[in-house]
Image (spheres, rainbow, N blue to C red):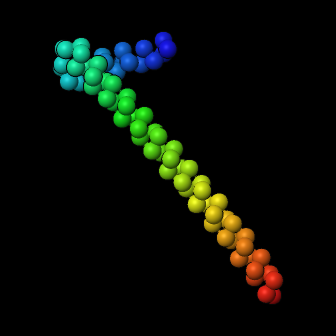
Amino acid sequence: MRQAARDLDRRIKEMADKTKVANTEKLMTIAALNVCYELLERQIDEQQQSDIEQRLELLDGKLEQALQDKSQIA
């Protein structure tokens, strides 16, 4: 929890330096939106990776079946 608080504080300070906004509430809102966006990106990446793994498993199964079918024909 403390690490999260330090990270948020760092983000707010960086945002204040970059934007020259002095309103703490605005800075906290921007920082919160950035954190939410990063979390959403990470969730999307994880879902895409899971989808790729499922597709690879299906492809592996199809290849195994094709090889078995070929060996039975030969």
64 w.r.t. 41: above or below: below
Residue 33 placement: quadrant:
top left
Residue 46, given in percent of the width and then of the height, sits at 51, 44
Residue 53 placement: quadrant:
bottom right
Residue 3, given in percent of the width and then of the height, sits at 48, 15
Name the residue located 75 percent from the left edge and 80 percent from the top edge: 69
Residue 12, given in percent of the width and then of the height, sits at 31, 18
18 w.r.t. 56: above or below: above
Q: Is residue 11 left or right of residue 56?
A: left
Q: Is residue 17 visible?
A: no
Residue 30 placement: quadrant:
top left
Q: Is residue 56 left or right of residue 27?
A: right
Name the residue located 72 percent from the left edge and 73 percent from the top edge: 65
Name the residue located 49 percent from the left edge and 14 percent from the top edge: 1
Q: Nearer the viewer, residue 24 or 17?
A: 24
18 w.r.t. 6: above or below: below
Numbered label tally: 0
Name the residue located 31 percent from the left edge and 24 percent from the top edge: 31
**Which quarter shows the C terminus?**
bottom right
Outermost residue, bottom side: 74
Q: Is residue 62 visible?
A: yes
Q: Is residue 74 left or right of residue 36?
A: right
55 w.r.t. 45: above or below: below
